[in-house]
Image: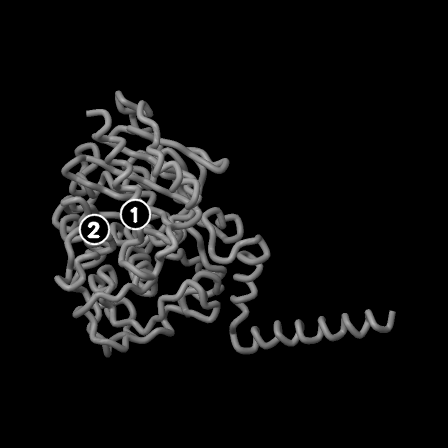
Amino acid sequence: MKFLKKLLKWIVIPFGLLILVTYVFDYNYILKGVRIVYFTGHNTAFIDDYPYFENAIIEKSNNPEPWPNHKDYNKVKETEVLSTSNKDWGTIAFVIIKNDSIWFENYYDGFNENSKTNSFSMAKSITSAMLGKAIMDGHIKSLDQPISDFYPKYKYAKTTVGDLASMASGLDWVESYTSPFSVTARSNYDDDLAEVILNQEITETPGVTYKYLSGSTALLGMIIQKATEKPLANYLSENFWKPMGATNDALWQLDDDDNKLAKAFCCISSNAKDFARFGKLYKDYGKWNGQQLLDSTFVVKSVTPRFNESPEYGYGWWLKEQNEKSFFMMRGHLGQYVIVQPEDNVIIVRLGHQKSSDEGEPTFTKDISVYIDEAYKMLNSKR
C-alpha cells in the first residue's frame, strides 16, 4: 500500500507541476490540443473535430439549390486505382461534377453527403473570396490597402491586404503542423486567437515573394471582420452560402475568447457538395444564377499566379498544371480538395482522413495527381 502511495505521489506531483508550468509560461493551449487530439486516438487535427470547439453557424440558403444529377449519374464505377487510393488514404467523399451536374459521387467510412467535416486550409480560399466581396462592397478599398489602416501597430510595415491573400505578407511565422510549440498549433487551440496573431511582427519585405503562412489568412480574416463590422460566419452566409443555395448549415470554429473570433485560416465544417459551390463560382467568374457575387476581375486575379517564380499560388487559390491542362483548387490539411478545370467544366471534390505519404516534399502531393488522372479516366470512358 505504501508503495502504491509513493508511486502515485511520483506520478501526480510531476504531472501537476507540468500543468502549472504550462499555465505560467502561457502554453496551456497545449493541454487543450492533447485532450482533443491524443485523448481521442489521433496524432494530428482530424476532419470531424468540430464538436470539440465552439462554432459559429453559417446559415444555409432559404432557397436551397441541390445540385442536379447528370444524365450519366453514377453510371461509371471507380477505377481500380481510385478505389485502392480511396481506401488507402481514407477518403470519406469523392464527387465529380460535370457541366454543373453531379456525374459521380460516393461516400465512405460511415460518412454521407450531409456529413460535416473540416475544410482545414480550404477556408483560406473562402476567406479570400470574402476579401473580394468586401472590396466589391466598399468596406475595403482595394487589394493595395495597407493593413495598418485596420491595425495601426503595423504602421512600420507596407503589407497590404493583397499581400495577406497572396501569401506575401512578410509575417514572422513558422508554418508547422507537428510541433505543439508552433504558432500554428497555438492558433488552433489558444483561447485568444487575436492576441496570438497580433503578437506576430512583419520581419521580411512584403509583396515581393510567396511564403505560405496561415497567420496571413488569420490576420486577413480579422481585417475583414473589422472592415465589415460583421462576424465572419455571418458575412459568409449572407454573401455566399445563402445566394449560392447551400443546402446545409455549416460551422466555423471559434477561439474561446469573448470576441469569438473565427479561425479564418481553417476549420469550416461542411460537406463536399456545398464546398464545391465555390469551385463553380470561380469557374463562372464570380457569377451565380445571373448574379455577380464577386467581381470577375478579382476572380481572374485570384486564379493567376502573382509571382512568376511561384506559379503554384494566386490569391487564396492553388494552381496546378497537369496533362496539359490548368487546374485551380482549394486545398486543406489531410487532403481536402475542390479541384476545378474550367475549360472542361469539371469539378472534383475529395475529402478524407489523410493524403499520400510524400507530404512536405513536392509542392503538390501524389494523391492530387491520382485523383485528377482517375477522375478523367472515368469521364473519358463514357465518350
- From the viewer's perspective, is 108 left or right of 154? right
Q: Which amino acid does label 1 sit on?
A: Ile
Q: Which residue is drawn at 24% across and 36% down?
A: 376
Q: Which amino acid does label 2 sit on?
A: Lys
Where in the figure is residue 160, as x and y percent of width and height? 20, 66
Quadrant of the frame with the C terminus: top left
Counting other residues with Cα less than 10 Å from the Cα at mark 1, is it few (<14), some (14-19), or many (20 or more)? some
Q: Do the residues under discs 1 and 2 have CB atoms within 8 angstroms? A: yes
Alpha carbon of mark 1 to alpha carbon of mark 2: how far?
A: 10 Å
Residue at the front extreme, as displayed: 80
Q: Which residue is drawn at 36% across and 39% down?
A: 272
- From the viewer's perspective, is 122 left or right of 341? right
Where in the figure is residue 217, as x and y percent of width and height? 31, 60
Q: Which of 320 and 273 is in front in this view?
A: 320
- From the viewer's perspective, is 343 left or right of 156? left
- From the viewer's perspective, is 1 left or right of 123? right
Residue behind mark 2: 320
Q: Is residue 77 above or below residue 172?
A: above
**Which of the marked residues, 1 or 2, is nearer the chain's N terminus?**
2
The answer to which image quadrant residue 84 occupies is: top left
Quadrant of the frame with the N terminus: bottom right
Q: Can residue 6 be seen in this view?
A: yes
Q: In this view, does 81 lie above or below 37?
A: above
Residue behind mark 1: 368
Q: Can residue 251 be seen in this view?
A: no
Q: Which residue is drawn at 55% across and 56% down?
A: 36
Q: Which residue is drawn at 20% across and 71% down?
A: 206
Where in the figure is residue 248, as x and y percent of width and height? 40, 36
Q: Is mark 1 on a helix, strand or loop?
A: helix
Counting other residues with Cα less than 10 Å from the Cα at mark 2, is it few (<14), some (14-19), or many (20 or more)? some
